[in-house]
Image (cartoon, rainbow, N blue to C red):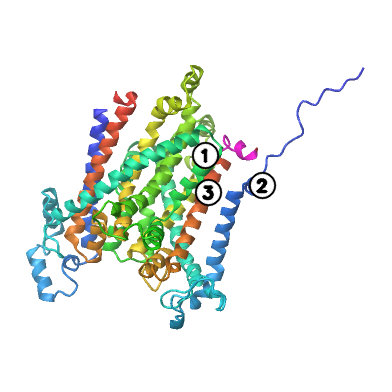
Amino acid sequence: MQHSTPELVPEHITPPSTMALLRRNPAALAAAMLLFVLVLAALFVAPILVDAASSTDLRGRNAPPFDFGRNWLFVLGADALGRPILPRIIVAAQNTLLIAGCSVVFALGVGSGLGLIAGYVGGTISQILMRVADIIMSFPSLLLAVIVLYMLEPSIFNLVIVLTITRIPVYLRTTRAEVMEIRKRMFVQASAVMGASHLRIILTHILPIVLPTLMTIATLEFAFVVLAESSLSFLGIGIQPPDITWGMMVAQGKPYLTQAWWLSFWPGLAIILTTLSLALLSNWMRLAFDPAQRWRLEL
Amino acid sequence: MLKHLRNRLISSLLSLAALIVIVFFLSRLTGDPSALYLPLDASIESRENFREINGLNDPLIVQFSSFAKDIVQFDFGKSLRTSRPALEMVLEAFIWTLQLALITIALVILVATVIGSLAAFNVGGLFDRVATVVSLIGASAPDFWIAIVGILIFSIGFGWLPTSGTGSLLHWVLPVAILFIRPFGLITQVVRNSMIAALHAPYTKTARAKGAGPRRIIFGHSLRNAALPIVTVMGDQAAGMLNGAVIVETIFGFPGVGKLMIDSILMRDFSVILASIVVTAIAILLMNILIDLSYAALDPRTRA
């Protein structure tokens, strides 16, 4: 007699890819798309609009938004010198994203690099790095930036340096804490026993585990840096005219608040949409990149 | 605990010292301090005179030791703008900022705890969703823009609240509300997450089995255990609140230390800047120690 064994193992289920997971989460998808469009606009549309963004038209001073009798560039209105707001926002996005992007990449690189060393080597190096991080963290970052930019000249380069230095401790602490825990796990010891070099262990065994956490933090940090840069520019200590950023546009519109609310409103809306998208995306990444939490999204 | 407190004190003093060293060398590295201290239109003779009087022709080490000595004795010199002692001006302004910060912190703790706990009690429910969205927006909103929109709506639109200055109780409403938003967003999220963990802990099950009502479970059992991470984040936020205070005070013309600092920077009033840096750093140092002490009060395990 022949009997077939019942199929115990169900048909092989392929876990959904990260992109598929993103498609299933409307909030995260909208956030990712908005950021994608923003980056495209800053990269490819902004260079075309540079002239339009700085051309003054005194007859169109404080022109109201949604006045369709005008050129489409004036759809969001015009500022106190008659410069159209929409192109200015797109051109300003270039500066804002450039500064925030550079600061995040530098801080991520330096912070996680030092964190890997501190966590892997431990000892005195680790202690010194942590104390330095404590010192940086113990003072409000905005005030620190204000002081440094007051002493040095406010330029894009100095702004990036300040925003980088004040944010390095975030990555340093997280990376160090994770590495210290991973280093003790069995597979790391196994590869050490098999003769892997320190560099190989760090790069191929430890870094891939820390990386998702770092990407999640970096996304949230991007929002923080955009806010910090905007605040500095708003206070007049960040980017200086004729360069523009969103924070500066809000500041420039402030004196005209009673006559023309749109001068400050639109650039501020651009900031909040950007930071909110980054926060949503970071929230989603925290679940998507964590094997223990990923099932929540796969349901 | 005492050992921890001592370590905290030492590292805080170290960071204060490091800050002073950095400020000193930045002010020297970037060129002639007479450019920092004297008004922009000072003559060459008066600059030369200033250098001689202040010993700026001495070696750097000598300069630094006299600089440090003055600071340790809280002698920051006089303000260029008002000719009053810089420290006096800073302390006067600091009281305002302290009041603003304390009122806001109290409100944040109260509101965020209640909302975060209620959201955690019914994860995924309508209240939870609304609370999550609101706190997410709050945590990522640019405070200077919210302030401007607030002025637009409540001061210009309805005419309920004054746009700037101090005087009546109404003058406090907008500054406190704006300063409230960012920490409220963050703390609500932390309360929610740490309450979700606490509500799933075994002791909560026990309490539920014994028939305790939801209010008693949330506020009597879970919240006390969830309080530790909340205090940690609140501590970080309290230092960050000074960031917010700079913005809020500048926009609303509130005579606190943040506005004083920005004004001094724009007027290049170096002695006042220095005094506000040191006073702020000391305030943060004291606050960190207070937070450590509150750990001990909340969690007996850390008292060892």
Along the viewing direction, whichever of B36 and B60 lies nearer the viewer: B36
**Residue at the spot 32% in from the left edge and 43% down from the top edge:** B105
Residue A67 percent coordinates (x, y): 54, 74
Q: Disc 2 residue type? A: Ala
- The residue wearing badge 3 is A280
Mark 3: few, some, or many residues within 10 Å (few <14, many ≥20)?
A: many
Q: Is residue A295 magenta?
A: yes
Chain letter belonging to callout 2: A
Mark toward the start of the polypeptide (3 vs 2):
2
Looking at the image, is mark 3 or mark 2 nearer the viewer? 3
Horizontal side, residue A238 vs residue A84: left or right: left
Q: On residue A20, which mark appears?
A: 2
Q: Are marks 3 and 1 in contact (CB under 8 Å)?
A: no
Looking at the image, is mark 3 or mark 1 nearer the viewer? 1
- Residue B114 vertical position relative to residue A147 in the rendered view, above or below: above
Magenta region: which residues? A290-298
